[in-house]
Image (cartoon, helix red, strand yellow):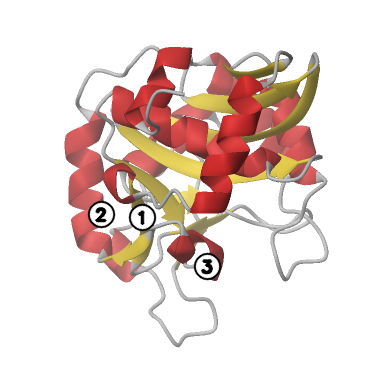
């Protein structure tokens, strides 16, 4: 068990593929801003259910979306065109972070009955957001928060966490907006943590953990962008309307 403030073990010690908990690195420690920043800087993230100790993971390989390889399928392109043409449609960043997390908490990951976003995780990431390391990308329609995602950012490294939607394709719009933001600001990759068929269809691919950790170390040392969405950023993803 990790003690609060204790450094993480080397990620090579995480449980291997085929084990009962592939990618599990450690348990315990603190769920505070310094610990979370240290974790993400070392390619580690927390994931645990309420009532469990804090569990820290570093799977190998790592699912990563290189932003230049994002696949904008025809159906999503049409959805974005309709969205951008709507008078009451807008993408915002960091105007409703806690509401986005609460929306994600009500939307379990595929194959799960419950959510890992309990009170401790919510409070921890709200504090991470206030410290400038966590961000929300939000889909707004007619003044209402319709969908969104939240992520962690260290320098130019971006780590996707979760998304939710209350309208058809709302979370896909938020993801496309994040990719557009990343392309416009030269952020080369978005960590997706673990492989899913949906992410693979969008262009994400597996990356060896060691290579991912090296990329994170380099990107985290670079200056962070200003996390604000400008409509001109759509031009990095879409041709002019």
Asked where in the image residue 113 lies, by quadrant, the reply is bottom right
How far apart marks 3 and 1 lie (CA) works out to 11 Å
Give left or right: position of 20 versus 220: right
Of the pair 88 and 11, the residue shown nearer to us: 88
Q: Residues within 10 Å of mark 2 (few under 14, many from 20)?
A: many
Please say if 11 is above or below 22: above
Of the pair 101 and 165, the residue shown nearer to us: 165
Asked which secondary structure carries label 1, the reply is: strand
Asked which secondary structure carries label 2, the reply is: helix
Query: Which residue is depicted at the point 40% across and 52% down?
Result: 71
Query: Which residue is depicted at the point 49% across and 60% down?
Result: 199
x and y percent of residue 111 in the render?
72, 71
x and y percent of residue 173 in the render?
59, 37
Please say if 178 is above or below 159: above
Asked which secondary structure carries label 3, the reply is: loop
Please say if 135 is above or below 68: above
Of the pair 157 and 117, the residue shown nearer to us: 157
Does the image show residue 227?
no
Q: Nearer the viewer, mark 1 or mark 2?
A: 1
Query: Which residue is depicted at the point 24% across and 28% down?
Result: 186
Give left or right: position of 148 versus 133: right
Q: Residues within 10 Å of mark 3 (few under 14, many from 20)?
A: few
Q: Earlier in the sequence, mark 3 or mark 1?
A: 1
- Residue 196 is labelled as 3
Instruction: Tell me whether circle 1 and circle 2 mark residues in contact (CB < 8 Å).
Output: yes
Does the image show residue 219?
yes
- Residue 212 is labelled as 2
- Residue 64 is labelled as 1
Q: Earlier in the sequence, mark 1 or mark 2?
A: 1
Residue most toward the front? 241
Instruction: Tell me whether circle 3 and circle 2 mark residues in contact (CB < 8 Å).
Output: no
How far apart marks 1 and 2 lie (CA) works out to 8 Å
């Amino acid at each position: 068990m990790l003690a609060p403030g204790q450094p993480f073990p080397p990620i090579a010690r995480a449980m291997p593929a085929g084990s009962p908990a592939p990618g599990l690195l450690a348990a315990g420690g603190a769920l505070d801003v310094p610990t979370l920043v240290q974790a993400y800087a070392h390619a580690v993230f927390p994931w645990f259910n309420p009532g469990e100790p804090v569990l820290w993971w570093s799977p190998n390989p790592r699912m990563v979306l290189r932003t230049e390889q994002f696949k904008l399928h025809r159906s999503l392109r049409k959805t974005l065109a309709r969205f951008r043409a709507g008078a009451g449609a807008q993408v915002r960043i960091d105007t409703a972070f806690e509401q986005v997390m609460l929306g994600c908490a009500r939307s379990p990951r595929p194959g799960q009955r419950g959510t890992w976003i309990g009170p401790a995780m919510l409070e921890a990431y709200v504090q991470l957001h206030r410290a400038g390391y966590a961000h929300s990308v939000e889909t707004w329609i007619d003044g209402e928060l319709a969908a969104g995602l939240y992520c962690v950012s260290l320098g130019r490294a971006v780590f996707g966490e979760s998304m939710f939607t209350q309208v058809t394709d709302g979370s896909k719009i938020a993801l496309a907006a994040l990719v557009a933001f990343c392309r416009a600001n030269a952020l080369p990759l978005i960590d997706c943590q673990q492989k899913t068929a949906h992410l693979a269809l969008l262009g994400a691919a597996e990356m060896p953990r060691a290579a991912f950790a090296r990329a994170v170390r380099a990107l985290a040392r670079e200056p962070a962008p200003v996390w604000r969405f400008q409509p001109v950023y759509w031009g990095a993803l879409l041709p002019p309307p």
